[in-house]
Amino acid sequence: MNGTTAREHRISAACAGALLVALGLCPSTAAGRDVVKLKDGSTFEGKITALAAAEVRIEADGKPQAFPNADVMSFALDDAPPSVRQGDTFSTAGDFERAIGAYQAALSDVSRGRARGLHRPLILQKLARAHRAHGNIEAALTALGALRAEGRDTRLYADSFRDSIEAARQRKERTSLETVLAVMEQESEPLASAARLERGKMRLEMGDAAGAREIFESLLAAKGMPHTSEARAWSLRALRRGGGPDEIEAACRAAIESDGSSPSLLQTAHALLGEAQLESARKGTAGAARESFLAFARALAQGPSSGEGNPEDYARALLGAARASALLSSADAPPEARRHYRIRAQGYLREATRTFKGTPWAKEASDELARLGE
């Protein structure tokens, strides 16, 4: 499968349909008319004149209209080359080799004037994602570079950097990622600080927790900069690898009590606080097991990770809640309470094995289930 694992292949095929919506490809309602659908449910038909970095512009009912991208749910360009739809069909079926050929044919149609230039960035993004799903990371990065060459004032310009970072990470060698970040750091905000955030993550992956945290804290120190909530969550994750118990607890409580903390940051802070309190419980600190359990429960209440979240936080919260429950089930408590916490521990561990199947977290959960007698 040209470097792509069977699991990655299944995931790519399953996501392909969702990608069509993400790119704004809703069915048009009338031949020769483009469509813009807004999140408030309203629909506009006419001729889309620009898919800009900040807005979608359309001539509807003889009047020019402009809608911020944040308000647009989807859009459709009526005159897409037929090979685009063929490529979408192949992508949905997981046949990425034929999808690549179809998207390349579509680019040729645009170059020959058979379709509007508005299609070109959209097709390049589709082509890049098909290359990536097929395992050809270098070709994916080349297509994304071509997308950026279309100009900064395009709806997909920022997305092209995010896709490039994901592709470079899939390659699992730092040179490609360094190259992407070097270009990204020359951009204006919010892209420049997003590149710094990625550099911090890369440092953390290399085992340099102190260097990573320095980068994250520098982002937090710059007032008015974007990504502050995400940088704070990553700073806590770096602290997990090198901070003392008191420093960790203080940082977690400060994040929890700060205004505007995102669900991702709250999950990270509560999970890390729970781990610190669990360690105290193991040392015999009175009441620490229950405090630990409550912290993990608050972390889990934020739900499985999405967007800026990190799946590790949810996994660690599940494992931590199970361990705190196991401590409570063996404490000096009435039999019914001990039974209650034992059942809870088993439930958290089962969820971890299901949600994170095939990962070290699932293995940990499975081993602990066995020790609990299941």
Image (cartoon, helix red, strand yellow):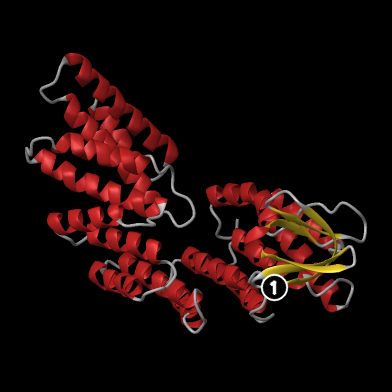
**SS class of the residue under badge 1?**
loop
Q: Is residue 140 left or right of residue 93?
A: left
Q: Which kind of residue does numbered mark 1 sit on? A: Ala
Residue denoted by label 1: 52
Looking at the rendered image, the quarter that the N terminus falls into is bottom right
What's the residue at 35%, 73% (across, down)?
219
Q: Is residue 37 visible?
A: yes
Looking at the rendered image, the quarter that the C terminus falls into is top left
**Residue 244 placement (x, y as % from top left):** 14, 58
Query: Looking at this view, is 247 or 314 the one in front?
Result: 247
Mark 1 surroundings within 10 Å by alpha-carbon count, few (fewer than 14), some (14 through 19), many (20 or more): some
Q: Is residue 310 visible?
A: no
Is residue 218 depicted above or below 267 in this figure?
below
Is residue 40 depicted above or below 75 in this figure?
above
Query: Looking at this view, is 9 or 297 the one in front?
Result: 297
Q: Residue farthest to the top?
A: 335
Query: Looking at this view, is 189 or 359 the one in front?
Result: 189
What's the residue at 79%, 53% (across, down)?
43
**Residue 204 placement (x, y as % from top left):** 31, 66
How many labels, in total? 1
**Residue 121 placement (x, y as % from top left):** 71, 71
